[in-house]
Image (cartoon, rainbow, N blue to C red):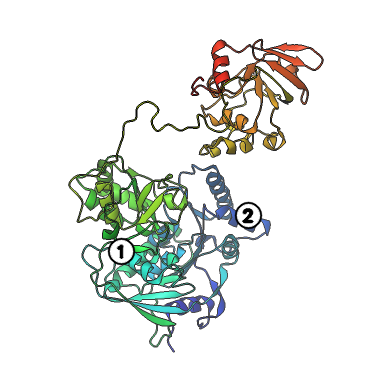
Amino acid sequence: MGKTIIEKILGNHAGRAVSAGDMVDITIDARVARDFGGANVVKNLVEHGLGVADAHRTFFTFDCNPGGSDQSYASNQQKCRLFARQRGIRVYDVDSGIGTHVAIDEGLIGPGETLVSTDSHANILGAIGAFGQGMGDQDIAHAFAHGTTWFVVPPTIKVMLEGLPSQTATPKDVALALNKHFGANGLLGYAAELYGPYIDGLDLAGRVTIASMCTEMGGIILLFPPNPAVLEYCRQARERFASYLGHGGPALPLVTATYAGTGAKYEREVTVDIEGLGPMISRPGHPEDVVPVADVRGQKIDSVFIGSCTNGRYEDLAAAARVLKGRRVAPGVVLKVVPATDRIWQHMLGDGLLKVFKDAGALVGNAGCAGCAAGQIGQNGPGEVTVSTGNRNFAGKQGKGSVYLASPETAAACAIAGLITTADAIPAEAATFETRARSGSEGRPTTARPEGRGSGGTKPTRVKGRVWVIAQDNIDTDMIFHNRYLTITDIKAMGQYTFDNLKGWEDFAQRAKPGDIVVTGKNFGCGSSRQQAVDCFQSLGIAAVVAESFGAIYERNAINAGLVILSAPAASELKDGEEVEIDFHTGAIRRTDGAEIHGKPFSDAQLKIYERGGLLVKSA
């Protein structure tokens, strides 16, 4: 009896014939860890004393946060780099792009071969008729160490696409139609093979688009029988990899296709009618909630994202550029474009696509996953309506707004129109945002100030509290409130991070009590202008901060927020844990034995701001 594609690939890598349901150990041709999860892979290897089976087939790809702009990602990337240097592993660093696309384009993986990655969309490799699978940190660590992992051979569904879509439809529209047909779990636990006239003529970019949305249908992998064009592309990519390895490198397998055998046993066969299919769109929250674009035409939007592993290839970006050429993004709408790989970025630069996007008013980012991974451009804010070419629009996945999924052409048309539409129905005039002038107090909130600020009115001009002495000069704002927390805007949430970047004081927030007084050295609060370095003390209920001197910007920020600060050159005389009373009018710091340390009294301006609860609080 013949075998399905997945049975053939896994059987070839298990060294024996396999059938659906068999659990087998398979050889992994390419083992990949990303900056997301990569540090944990390294941790698992180090803690268990494991080596690397074959450095030539082992890789790191930094695609989730290519800029390393998040402290956690930057730390993870560096841990992986250090490990890679020690073990001779190649790193496709922040200038490379999405790992699965790099694997295809650089010949790390070919048809009929196997790849595992910490990427849940590693099954994108089905586009070239290869087996790709996203796995957890322990699985990837085992593959790094032994070159193998176990897998249960999935049953296969044969999917026949019947008919041809309309000329206005794209591979993304077909992918969305499949999502609608199968739903969020219609392929759960299955591999699928795709056939039909439409599939036969589909280029690599189109296959990648459809394969990348298999995960959103619950599937293991969507496998495309390679056509001659795909095979030739993979052969050229394999030559690039062989060139990198050089004459002393290991022999690489020839690129050959794996096809289902005659009489292969399928779980079932499904026909999906795509005849005349037009532009489709997924409504926010559910990739499978797919309707014709016409059903939501006219919905005002705030932003558009074009990119991701689903639609970040050159052909996708060229299609969007054809819609955008000679036009401008609608007023107030933000268009973000991120190519999948640096090879594509360079292609865009060379043939003028980059200029088309910039002339249209787009922000073009460096290659990578972008907003899908919350690590680069592409995220949206509360209430923001986005049209995205990604594969997921779960609530919170790409930010705090609403995300519609569509093709690059539809997304580009929406950016120009300022509302949801299609490329063949872009209105002559772009939609604009409604604005309404306000006068007087119209529309102002009834609560006068944020949590943690003073409440105005009569306030005490003396405070008494327990002293925390931090005998250190030049404590900067990163030590007080690190930049990794700067996205926090709720003062109530800031206190927990106070001093967590100051060595020896990381647990200050857990030990401090409301009413305590912080006493420190010279130039307290030097560094950045961040307001959070003031607000975190108000969040904890700290009664006052006494320093020998303050950074200039910090002093202004503290006064404007109504935080009690006092400059006292002799503050170092105070002892940790003692109780003192501070008089704002005189600047006196009275100790329990009656002795006084003289600080700088509040100026009239400082006192007035303090008494009303902050610079922006209206006087009663």
SS class, disc 2: helix
Q: Looking at this view, is 382 or 259 the one in front?
A: 382
Q: Is residue 243 visible?
A: no
Q: Residues within 10 Å of mark 1 (few under 14, many from 20)?
A: many
First in residue order: circle 2 vs circle 1: 2
In the displayed structure, would residue 376 be above or below residue 529?
A: below
Snapshot quadrant of residue 358: top left
Q: Name the residue tied to disc 1.
A: 173
Q: Residues within 10 Å of mark 2 (few under 14, many from 20)?
A: some
**Residue 464 vs residue 333: left or right?**
right
**Residue 225 vs residue 596: left or right?**
left
Q: Which mark is residue 311?
A: none
Residue 256 image point, x, y percent: 38, 74
Residue furthest to the left: 428
Residue type at mark 1 is Asp
In the displayed structure, would residue 459 be above or below residue 230?
A: above
Distance from Cα at disc 2 to Cα at disc 1: 41 Å
Residue furthest to the right: 593
Image quarter hosting the N terminus:
bottom left
Residue 439 image point, x, y percent: 34, 27
In the displayed structure, would residue 265 be above or below residue 516?
A: below
Residue 238 image point, x, y percent: 39, 64
**Residue 101 vs residue 456: left or right?**
left
Q: Name the residue tied to disc 2.
A: 43
